[in-house]
Image: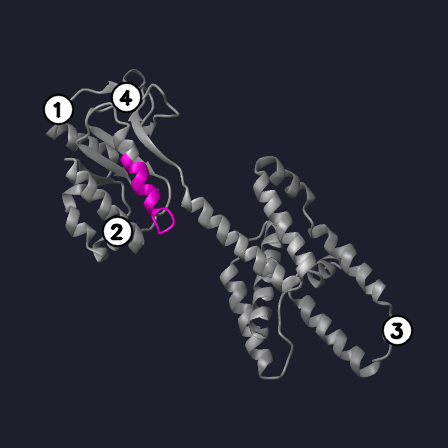
Amino acid sequence: MGGVAVALVSFADTSVLSRTYAARLRAPVDPNQEMVGLGAANLAAAFFQGFPISSSSSRTPVAEAAGARTQLTGVVGAAAIALLLVFAPNLLRHLPHTALAAVVIASAIGLIEVSDLRRIYRIQRWEFWLSMGCFVGVAVLGAIPGIALAIVIAVIEFLWDGWRPHSAVLGRVEQVRGYHDITRYPGARLIPGLVLFRWDAPLFFANAELFHERALDAVAGSPTPVRWLVVAAEPVTSVDVTAADAVCELDETLRAAGIELRFAEMKDPVKDKLKRFGLFTRFGEQSFFATVDEAVSTYLAAHPVEWVDWEDRRP
């Protein structure tokens, strides 16, 4: 547990600090390379009974304030400490801790981005309060429990966003290319018997049932009897087993009502998952279209109908 705690703190400290200075100095940073370097340094230190190695949100600002610009600073600092320990080990023995704290605070205070907090509060307040909650967690519980709390909150927030994502019924809008949400474009036009349904999230266990419900709601809200339900699947980046089962249940429900389920703009990696789940064979390659336009054209070729105005035919 001690090793896990050290690794967790090191990861958080290194990733945050590297991104902060990369943004400040307008330099690129590779988080993976940072982790590889950190791991290699700790592996080397392990053979010599050294301390765990990490970046430092206190030493880095101090070095920058002193004029450091390259990694040679660490070499010079290590050499200076070695000389101090050999020739003058008692020189700084009685230096007050408050003096050391003042140096660290004066240098590290620049890392506090008050303007960014104001911007976050103005743009999206729940993210501001989330950051404040994590800050209080670290201050009250300590670094390790506080970081663990922040990770748990972040996972919960991710699941919450994915649990109730946005979805829309699409229609054709005059003088605007493509197909768009009919609730945002009241003048959008629909094709009788065709429902274009867009799901704006990955399909996984947390939202699979909601996907099933909203797809059926889209069919029930159609102003005309439905022949095809086309899922505009471009935003769907993944499908898990639970979601695949929900798609099967949706297909069975639609078939019982005489409605065919089709997909448009589905990404190839998602198709590969459907093939492993056996769904690609179930629906057949003809049920997948490269674009929504292709799906609409295929439907119109099989069922010649006229567009209708959603605003005029709303049930």
Label 2, secondary structure: give it.
helix
As for residue 246 lying within the magenta part, the answer is: no
Q: Residues within 10 Å of mark 3 (few under 14, many from 20)?
A: few
- Magenta span of residues: 203-216
* Callout 3–callout 1 Cβ contact below 8 Å: no
Mark 2 and mark 3 lie on one chain; the one further toward the N terminus is 3
Mark 3 and mark 4 lie on one chain; the one further toward the N terminus is 3
Q: CA distance from mark 3 to mark 4?
A: 81 Å
Residue 189 is labelled as 4
In the picture, residue 174 is in which quadrant? top left
Q: Residues within 10 Å of mark 2 (few under 14, many from 20)?
A: some
Q: Is residue 236 visible?
A: no
* Callout 3–callout 4 Cβ contact below 8 Å: no
Mark 1 and mark 4 lie on one chain; the one further toward the N terminus is 4
Mark 3 and mark 1 lie on one chain; the one further toward the N terminus is 3
Circle 2 residue: 245
Q: CA distance from mark 1 to mark 4?
A: 16 Å
Residue 94 is labelled as 3
Q: CA distance from mark 2 to mark 4?
A: 32 Å
